Every structure is written in structure tokens, then in C-alpha cells.
Amino acid sequence: MGDITIREARMEDSSAITTILRDLGWTEPIQKESFTETLAQIQERLARSNREQEHTILVAEQRQEGTQEQVVGYLAVHWYAHLMRGSEAFVSELFIHPDQTGQGIGSRLLSTIEEQARRRGCTRLLLMNRRIRASYARKFYMKNGWEELGDAAFFSRTLSAPAR
């Protein structure tokens, strides 16, 4: 494994992020889109994240000897105020390219965002991990110090997308 650098995502990372999602086979809608369609959406969301302070997107960049850096993973977090607990953060996405898993890259992204959360005065980090995912089966988050909230249920309500 080459050296890993964790940094904030830049617009030029959008193609690598799109490739990661497509190579993982992530979500049926992405697989039905063209690369160009997915790329445009990633670029739009990166631009929004860079404009607003409520989101942070980190990338893991790997440098192999004799090559240039390559984005091999990313993490997206949403910062928000919680009236009862103070500031919190929700990790909505953590994806590593399938050829790079098992090398500690996801753990590095999590520890970096935890440091940022502490500096922001957050009292808690949250995330959802579906039980059907490989990361759940191998207890990735538990091994990184996270605990499963057995008494909580996550609910979802799908909304139609606003007209563009």
C-alpha cells in the first residue's frame, strides 16, 4: 500500500468519486445512469458542499511509488445542531474503491472526521450501516470504536426530486 493522504474533496475529484461508486455497483439508480450523468450530479453536490458549511467531504488519496496520487475512497458528513445534545454529525457516505479495501483507508477517514467533529464541539457522530452490507458483517464500525444502537430504528421517506 502506498502513502495515504486525507484531505477535503475538490471539484477535480468528482470523476474518481464517480468511478468508485460505479465500480462498487452502488445503488440501482446510479447503475442505470451514464457515467456523465452521475459525474454531473457528483460535481453539483461537491460544489454545494464547498459553498456551504453544513457538509464536509473528505477523500483518501493514495500515492504508489512512481505514480501520481489517486483518490481511492471518500467520506461525506453533515454537521447539524441538535437542541438537546449540542452539535452532532451524521456520516452519510463512506466508500472505498473495491480494489483498495482492507488497507485501513476507511479507518483513516473515520478518525479524521472524528478529529474534525471534536474541534467543532460535536457531542456525537452517527451513521447508518445496513445489516446486509459487508462492512456490517465484518464489524468494521465496531472495530473502529462505534457502537450499535440496538434500541433505535431508522426510518425513511422517499420524496420526489424537485424540478430542475
Image (cartoon, rainbow, N blue to C red):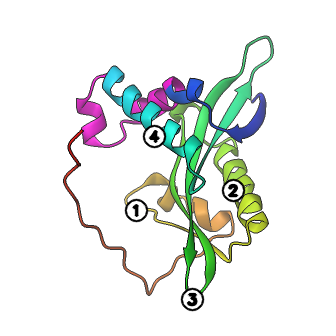
Q: Distance between the Cα atoms at labels 3 and 4?
A: 29 Å
Q: Residues within 10 Å of mark 3 (few under 14, many from 20)?
A: few
Start-end of magenta stretch:
15-34
Mark 2 surroundings: few (<14), some (14-19) or many (≥20) residues within 10 A: many
Distance from label 2 to label 4 (Cα)?
19 Å
The residue sitting at the top extreme is 66
The residue pinned by badge 4 equals 45
* N-terminal-most mark, 1 or 4: 4
The residue indicated by pointer 2 is: 113
Tag nearer the camera, 2 or 3? 3
Spatial CA distance of label 2 from label 3 is: 22 Å
Residue on which disc 3 sits: 84
Residue at image x 46%, y 83%?
150
158 sits left or right of 13 in the view: left
Q: Secondary structure at mark 3?
A: loop
Percent of width and height locating residue 129: 46, 62
Give the overall secondary structure of the magenta segment.
helix
Quarter of the image with the N terminus is: top right
Does label 2 or label 3 sit earlier along the sequence? 3
- Report which quarter residue 32 is drawn in: top left
Mark 1 = which residue? 130
Per the rendering, the mark at residue 162 is none
* Whether label 2 touches label 4, CB < 8 Å: no
Q: Residue at x 51, y 38 (%)?
A: 46
